[in-house]
Amino acid sequence: MSKTHQQHNNQVRIIGGIHRGRKISFPSATGLRPTADSVRERLFNWLGQDLTGKTVLDLFAGSGAMGFEAASRHAQQVVMVEMNKQVASVLKTNQTHLQLSQSKIHCTDAFNFLRSCDQLFDVVFLDPPFGWLHWDQLLTQLTAYIQPQARVYLESNALPALPSGWQILKEGKSGKSRFALLSYDHQY
């Protein structure tokens, strides 16, 4: 069984915004699987096509498809977190090539990033490698970093049980991927 997706030829296309149609490259890496165009299109229909003024966190950036898509759609700031050094380096190259100065790339793991984070986000993308098991811990910790009306996109091979306060607004599936748009009730 292959651990990388060769079907994409290590490129994904930005599907909307100012960079619509532009391709971004990414290296082969274990567990890296870009979110399909059709799923990204559905997600951005759910979020609204224009993210003007939004602060976005792409916590498992991988190919950068989600973060660069948000930046292309006028997000005010996009923070992309990727722990693989080679993948993070390519993200920085793509950021420079696309001239997306509102994007910031951090090479660290999700929990280390959150421990040092001092801002709140309007939109969060969570798409770790399939089989990742720390959902309860991550979703519980994430509540301190999201705005009251924030939307959190989660993608995995199976939707996890959600801790108290989280609710699914919309959900879908594509191939082996299950995905959902979540919100959190800050009263918990």
Image: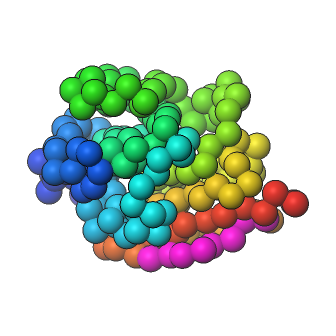
| Residue 44 point in image, percent of width and height | 40, 62
Up-down relation of residue 157 to residue 127 (above or below): below
The type of colouring in the image is rainbow
Q: Is residue 1 left or right of residue 102?
A: left
Q: Quadrant of the C terminus?
A: bottom right
Image position of 74 (left or right of 171): left
Quadrant housing residue 151: bottom right
Q: Nearer the viewer, residue 54 or 69?
A: 54
**Residue 173 percent across, percent down from the top left:** 40, 75
Residue at image x 16%, y 44%?
23
Task: Reply yes or no: does residue 51 show up in magenta.
Answer: no
- Residue 135 drawn at (x, y percent): 63, 55
| Residue drawn at point x = 31 percent, y = 73 percent | 175
Q: Is residue 5 above or below residue 38?
A: above
* Along the line of sight, the residue nearer the viewer: 129 or 171: 171
* Residue range (magenta): 165-172
Residue drawn at (33%, 57%) of the image:
35
The answer to whether residue 41 of the structure is visible from this angle is yes
What is the chief secondary structure element of the magenta stretch? Answer: strand
Q: Pinpoint residue 114: horizontal percent, then vertical percent.
A: 66, 33
Based on the displayed image, in which of its 4 quarters is residue 120 positioned? top right
Vertical side of 18 occupied by 188: above or below: below
**Where does the N terminus fall, quadrant-wise?**
bottom left
- Residue for point 39% across, 60% down: 49
**Residue 12 in view here:** no
Along the horizontal axis of the image, is 9 left or right of 148? left
Residue 163 shown left or right of residue 107 in the figure? right
